[in-house]
Image: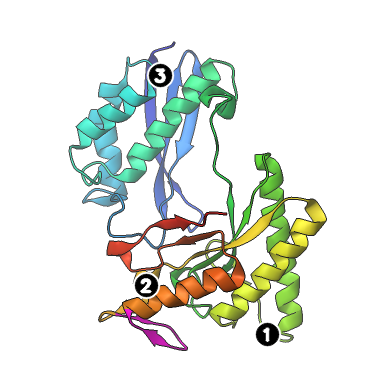
């Protein structure tokens, strides 16, 4: 397979207008390009988006160290490339070079390898690989949408063997919810948060009810199973050992009971970060 011939980095703006990086990797006469935006709400155990010094320092380290050490490596040896990035960084959470740089670089390498093999990325990765179902961000609150729900993200999880059908089904849920909110809240402003999820004056349970109805309707219309899912981002409303919602304040034990009740009442397929950050993580419901 082709050796990595050249690596370039540039500063760009992500969808929120924040500075991030985009990396080009040339191998075998073709170029792989990837960018890495970072989230607005990150957990305590996630990698550091940037080193001390921010984007400018990340770009400097890439040009000084990363590009030189990756040049000449086999673009098809993805594990070796990723291991090299870990060695260059030397920390547990990419605090030295930044998770955004490592992610963009790794993705650009594999895209270059796929292009060199004259294959689309999914085919290059392997026909027998399983791919995750896409989540569609439908209703938003928390840090993503001030004035919305306490819970940060209400998702549609479309589950078709065809990734493209799942994406279109999630988009149909998003569109349907807009109309449902307008009918439910006549005269109220229905806006979008910073990730394009709908924002409305609803309680958490009301939002789930709307989402569940939309998922069921789209499932019938498209034949693609769609199920509601949540990212609570509970760290955002965890205060002094309790979970502080607009309508209630819960102890950790009651929080578990509350979320378990939501799972059963609304047939949730996935719940992410139901406890605070030091204890969080995604939980997929077994069906």
Tag 3's secondary structure?
Answer: loop
Q: Is residue 264 above or below residue 186?
A: above
Secondary element at tag 2:
helix
The alpha-carbon separation of the residues under discs 3 and 1 comes to 53 Å
Pointer 3: residues within 10 angstroms few (<14), some, or many (20+)?
A: many
Colouring: rainbow
The quarter holding residue 186 reads bottom right
- The residue positioned 26% from the left and 27% from the top of the image is 84
The residue drawn where x is 36% and y is 59% is 42
Label 1 close to label 2 by CB (< 8 Å): no
Q: Is residue 29 above or below residue 212?
A: above
Q: Which mark is residue 75?
A: 3
Of callouts 3 and 1, the N-terminal one:
3
Which mark identifies residue 188? 1
Confirm whether the magenta stretch covers residue 191: no
SS of the residue at dot 1? loop
**Left or right of residue 71: residue 263:** right
Residue placed furthest toward the right: 221
Left or right: 261, with 237 as reference point: right
Magenta region: which residues? Answer: 242-251
Q: Which residue is mark 2?
A: 236
Q: Position of residue 265 (x, y in %)?
A: 59, 73
- Could you tell me if residue 151 is visible in this image? no
In the foreground, 242 or 44: 242
Q: Position of residue 92 (x, y in %)?
A: 21, 44
Locate residue 249 relative to residue 86 in the image: left or right.
right
- Which sits earlier in the primary sequence, circle 1 or circle 2? 1
Query: Residue 48 location, x and y as percent?
Result: 28, 51
């Amino acid at each position: 397979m082709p050796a990595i011939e050249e690596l370039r980095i540039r500063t760009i703006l992500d969808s929120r207008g924040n500075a991030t990086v985009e990396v080009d990797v040339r191998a075998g006469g073709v170029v792989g390009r990837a960018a890495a935006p970072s989230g607005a709400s990150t957990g305590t155990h996630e990698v550091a988006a940037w080193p001390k010094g921010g984007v400018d320092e990340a770009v400097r380290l890439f040009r000084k160290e990363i590009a030189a050490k990756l040049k000449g490596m086999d673009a098809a040896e993805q594990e070796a490339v990723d291991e090299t990035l870990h060695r260059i960084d030397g920390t547990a959470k990419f605090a030295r070079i930044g998770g955004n740089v490592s992610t963009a670089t790794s993705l650009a390498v594999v895209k270059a390898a796929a292009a060199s093999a004259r294959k689309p990325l999914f085919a290059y990765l392997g026909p027998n690989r399983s791919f995750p179902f896409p989540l569609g961000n439908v209703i938003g609150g928390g840090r993503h949408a001030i004035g919305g729900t306490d819970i940060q993200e209400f998702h549609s999880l479309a589950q078709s063997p065809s990734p493209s059908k799942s994406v279109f089904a999630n988009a149909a849920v998003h569109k349907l919810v807009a109309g449902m909110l307008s009918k439910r809240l006549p005269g109220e402003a229905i806006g979008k948060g910073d990730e394009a999820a709908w924002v409305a004056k609803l309680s958490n349970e009301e939002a789930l009810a709307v989402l569940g109805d939309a998922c069921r309707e789209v499932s019938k219309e498209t034949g693609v199973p769609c199920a509601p899912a949540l990212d609570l981002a509970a760290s955002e409303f965890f205060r002094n050992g309790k979970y502080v919602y607009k309508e209630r304040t819960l102890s950790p034990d009651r929080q578990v009971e509350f979320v378990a009740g939501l799972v059963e009442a609304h047939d949730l397929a996935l719940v992410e970060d139901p406890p605070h950050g030091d204890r969080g993580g995604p939980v997929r419901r077994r069906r």
